Image (cartoon, rainbow, N blue to C red):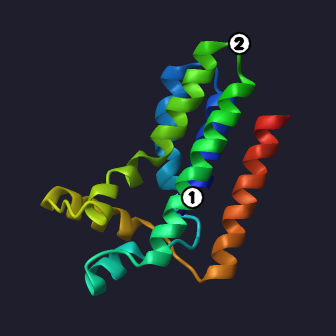
Amino acid sequence: MIETPHVIVGAAIATAVANPALALPLALGSHFVLDKIPHWNPHLLTETKKYGKPTGKSTLIVAADVSASLVVSLSIASLALPDNIKALTILAACFLAILPDVVEGPYFFLNIRPKFIEKWINFQRAFQINTSFVPGVLTQVVTVAVSLWWILT
């Protein structure tokens, strides 16, 4: 799953669960739950094995997704202001919701390839359920819509 749905679900959890000690682990756990939903994302590992790095198209998709995730995270956290603790909890939950993918970033984009990251990538890859573009994007759009409804109501 791309990062933006993960971030919005993490924000929804932090918005709904008042206790950060509960919200933050739930946000991290949500990453693995969402990856079990059939979804589409760029095939960074396949491209890296074939070309030595992700393609320009995939890199552009990742950059746009990460940028959108940052904007969405900050926007949702700002809704909690002036409650600074809640706003920071939302930001932390957004980060934890994508942390399992952030760990992979150096492997794909900085050519840093220690064995533990390779093992992590293989673990996550075995965990995910990928599908073709249209249904895979649709599940992510529905995830975002439901999460935003949860946050805004």
Residue nearest the viewer, comparing 35 with 92: 92
**Residue 27, x across and y down, in percent:** 52, 39
| Residue at x 41%, y 65% (from the top left corner) | 127
| Residue at x 14%, y 59% (from the top left corner) | 114
| Residue at x 78%, y 40% (from the top left corner) | 150
Check the picture and name the quadrant holding the C terminus. top right
In the displayed image of the protein, which residue is found farthest to the right?
Answer: 153
* Residue identified by numbered label 1: 65
Q: CB of mark 2 within 8 Å of CB of mark 1?
A: no
Name the kind of residue labelled 1 in the image: Asp
Q: Distance between the residues labelled 2 and 1?
A: 28 Å
**Residue 36, x across and y down, in percent:** 52, 63
Element type at mark 1: helix
* Residue identified by numbered label 2: 82
Residue nearest the viewer, comparing 16 with 49: 49
Q: Please rate how many residues cluster around mark 2, counting C-alpha atoms within 10 Å: few if below 14, some from 14 to 19, many from 20.
A: few
Q: Please rate how many residues cluster around mark 1, counting C-alpha atoms within 10 Å: few if below 14, some from 14 to 19, many from 20.
A: some
**Taking 29 as reference, is 132 above or below it?**
below
Name the kind of residue labelled 2 in the image: Pro
| Residue at x 30%, y 77% (from the top left corner) | 48
**Residue 124, x across and y down, in percent:** 36, 62
**Taking 31 as reference, is 23 above or below it?**
above
Q: Earlier in the sequence, mark 2 or mark 1?
A: 1
- Which label was assigned to residue 134? none
